[in-house]
Amino acid sequence: EAAFIMERTHEAYRLSPNALFYLLYKLHKNPIKTRPVCSTCGSIAEAIGKYVDELLRPMAQSQSSYFRDSTAFKQRLDKVCLPPNAQLFTMDATAMYSNICSEAALKVLSEYLRR
């Protein structure tokens, strides 16, 4: 693990050690709003992020709510039989992770990774 991170960190530092911060404009909002993005592609943090992703991916994929991509989600929806009077709706999520207790989440992740 350490060798992987060291190799990737060295490679990233040679290219550009910094993450890139930019704003995406939400033109469909009135008034126009922005969404902040911090891209770590090619930065020092990318190697650590890939390592953490590799560790946590099995845990995420074992959840019943997991789907690989939008195609897999669509295939799952195609199998759902709804009653004739059912209504579908969508929602826009905001501040999705502000209600997660960081201490509890870290405890669960630590227990999982120790297995």
Image (spheres, rainbow, N blue to C red):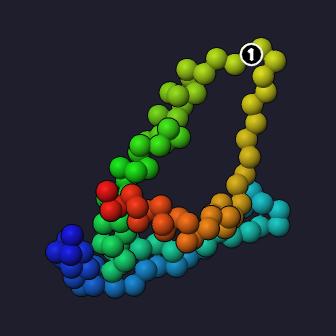
Classify residue 48 as left or right of residue 23.
Answer: left
- For the C terminus, the quadrant is bottom left
- Say which of 101 and 95 sits in front: 101
Residue 109: quadrant of the picture: bottom left
Mark 1, other Cα within 10 Å: few <14 / some 14–19 / many ≥20? few
How many numbered badges does the structure rendering display?
1
- Examine the rendering and report whether any part of residue 53 can be seen: no
- For the N terminus, the quadrant is bottom left
Residue 25: quadrant of the picture: bottom right
- Say which of 41 and 87 sits in front: 87
- Say which of 75 and 98 sits in front: 98
Residue picked out by circle 1: 83
Q: Position of residue 45 (x, y in %)?
A: 37, 77
Q: Position of residue 48 (x, y in %)?
A: 33, 73
Q: Say if 87 sits above or below 92 in the image.
A: above
Q: Position of residue 26 (x, y in %)?
A: 69, 63
- Examine the rendering and report whether any part of residue 44 can be seen: yes
Classify residue 27 as left or right of residue 72.
Answer: right
The structure residue drawn at horizontal position 53% and vertical position 40%, both measured from the top left corner, is: 65
Q: Position of residue 39 (x, y in %)?
A: 46, 72
For mark 1, give the secondary structure. Answer: loop
Classify residue 8 as left or right of residue 50.
Answer: left
* Residue lying furthest top: 84
Type of residue at label 1? Pro
The structure residue drawn at horizontal position 33% and vertical position 80%, both measured from the top left corner, is: 44
The structure residue drawn at horizontal position 52% and vertical position 28%, both measured from the top left corner, is: 76
Classify residue 32 as left or right of residue 81.
Answer: right
- Say which of 109 and 37 sits in front: 109
The structure residue drawn at horizontal position 41% and vertical position 74%, both measured from the top left corner, is: 40
